[in-house]
Image (cartoon, grey):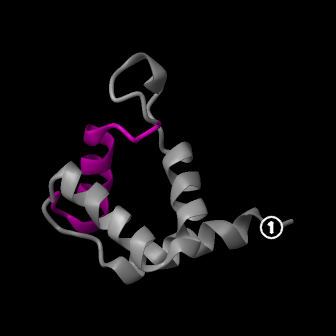
Amino acid sequence: MHYTSFLRQLAGLALRDPRLVPLLLGAAWRFRARHWYRRAPFLPLPPPDYVEWRLRTAYGDVTEAPPAAELVRYLRWTKRMQKP
């Protein structure tokens, strides 16, 4: 899966369920690249090579797209883990 298509998938999740927007933004912030503010497009996004590595270690192939339900489950899990 290409990095931009992965970001499009995340944007699609946000459009379908706006309640996920804060969770997606929190995940983007946790996975952001170091010194993201020094490089265009000046957004706190994860580096493409890191996303590819995560996909390869999780699914065995960078072209494998994580199912939307799995992404939503991860986002909700991170929210539950942040509660005291």
**SS class, disc 1:** loop
Q: Nearer the viewer, residue 49 or 56?
A: 49
The furthest residue to the right: 84
Say what amino acid the circle numbered 1 marks: Lys
Q: Who's the residue at 22% across and 50% down the image? A: 3
Q: Let me know if residue 43 is in the magenta part.
A: no
Q: Nearer the viewer, residue 55 or 76?
A: 76
Q: Position of residue 6 (x, y in %)?
A: 26, 59
Q: Quadrant of residue 14?
A: bottom left
Count of number-bearing discs: 1
Q: Quadrant of residue 11?
A: bottom left
For label 1, the crowd category at 10 Å Cα-Cα, with few meaning under 14, some 14 to 19 and many 20 or more, is few
* Disc 1 target residue: 83
Q: Which residues are magenta?
A: 44-62
Q: Is residue 68 left or right of residue 81?
A: left
Q: Who's the residue at 33% across and 70% down the image? A: 12
Placement of 32 over or under 55, stated as above or below:
above
Quadrant housing the C terminus? bottom right
The dominant secondary structure in magenta is helix
Q: Let me know if residue 48 is in the magenta part.
A: yes
Q: Who's the residue at 55% across and 44% down the image? A: 29
Quadrant housing the N terminus? bottom left
Q: Who's the residue at 54% across and 53% down the image? A: 25
Q: Position of residue 16 (x, y in %)?
A: 41, 79
Placement of 69 over or under 51, stated as above or below:
below
Q: Is residue 81 left or right of residue 15?
A: right
Q: Is residue 18 left or right of residue 54?
A: right
Q: Position of residue 48 (x, y in %)?
A: 27, 41
Q: Is residue 71 left or right of residue 27?
A: left
The furthest residue to the top: 38
Placement of 54 over or under 76, stated as above or below:
above
